[in-house]
Amino acid sequence: MSRLWKDSVQDQHIEQLKRTEKVPDHIAFIMDGNGRWAVDRGLPRVAGHKEGINSVREIVKASSNLGVKYVTLYAFSMENWRRPSKEVNFLMDLLLRYLRDELDELHANNVRLQAIGKINALPKKVQQQLHESMEVMKDNTGLTLVLALSYSARWDIVRAVQTAALDVRRGKLSPEDITEDLFSTFLQTKEFPDPDLVIRTSGEMRLSNFLLWEAAYSELFVTERFWPEFRKEQLFEALDDYVGRERRFGKTSSQVNEQVQQSVKDKILNVFRK
Ligand code: FPP
């Protein structure tokens, strides 16, 4: 029997964050520092990846309980293929095991699984398991878990440009019709909202070719913690910081405040209209 996450004792911090009504719809994670976490403990680098899976489990569960709609995990970048083959093989085995072992629990908790990246570059058995898991969970309506695998944002942008260019050549599209919104529909992330928050562990201040188009207006949160020690308390810390931020999308602070006041007025009026 798979455990139902909602049945676990509800965390006060989760309730407190939910009350702010500012929990992000989409959080994207750059899970960095597995190797350093292991080396600091005199362990082989791969031990950090193994421990990182426990963080993945805890973060997915906490995000679901918080009501986050999308979580994207940068699990393997296109550049990661350049690592020693032993480490790459270990990561692929870990991914395969994660997909197999977590399927029932993710499914029981209404999680939908999606993937972005050059999926056909993955070992065949990983591709098969990934497709099987996505198929089983395809109608679920809870958290959408997006795994970025063999992913490169520049690769996806170039792929999108090529697809749009082909449509232009075939006469299906005219260059003037290509707007930001239309261009987004050519990206693999077309179905998902842009991330509200990008969290990176292990202190590095960069995006590392992750969701470059989609993260244009995302809030960034960088923590010194390594991924294997990034657990739900650290997620809450990032969200406490996020809910206190003002997202202006290029507007002035007073414009944003007016907008907030207007939406409160609209909500009150709607209550009276009902
Ligand atoms: C970066 O740490 C992490 C990775 C390249 C892999 C992340 C993978 C996992 C957490 C496990 C698999 C994930 C899923 C979703 C099944 P690093 O090795 O670059 O660390 P370093 O910068 O300290 O060397």
Image (cartoon, rainbow, N blue to C red):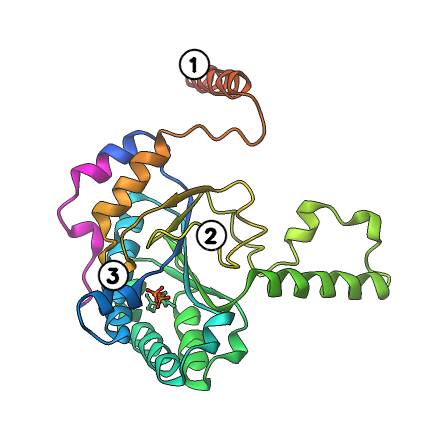
Contact (Cβ within 8 Å) of mark 2 with mark 3: no
Q: Which residue is mark 2?
A: 206
Q: Indicate whether 69 appears above or below 92.
A: above
Q: Between tags 2 and 1, which lies in front?
A: 2
Within 10 Å of the Cα at label 1, are there few (<14), some (14-19), or many (20+) other Cα atoms? Answer: few
Q: Position of residue 35 (x, y in %)?
A: 30, 68
Residue most extreme to the left: 9
- State which quarter of the image contains the N terminus: bottom left
Residue at image point 44% right, 18% down: 264
Measure the alpha-carbon separation of dots 2 and 1: 48 Å
Q: Which residue is mark 1?
A: 272
115 lies left or right of 50? right
**Amino acid identity at mark 3:** Pro
Q: Which residue is mark 3?
A: 228
Where does the magenta region start and end? 2-15
86 lies left or right of 247? left
Q: Name which of mark 3 and mark 1 comes first in the sequence.
A: 3
Q: Position of residue 142 (x, y in %)?
A: 36, 52
In which image quadrant can residue 109 be found? bottom left
Q: Name which of mark 2 and mark 3 comes first in the sequence.
A: 2
**Amino acid identity at mark 2:** Arg
Residue 4 highlighted magenta (yes or no): yes
Residue at image point 81% right, 56% down: 173
SS for dot 1: helix
Q: Nearer the viewer, residue 12 or 215?
A: 215
Measure the alpha-carbon separation of dots 3 and 1: 50 Å
266 lies left or right of 200? right
**In the image, is the residue at mark 3 within 8 Å of ligand 1 by its beta carbon?**
yes
For ligand 1, the image quadrant comes to bottom left
**Amino acid identity at mark 1:** Phe
Residue at image point 50% right, 71% down: 79
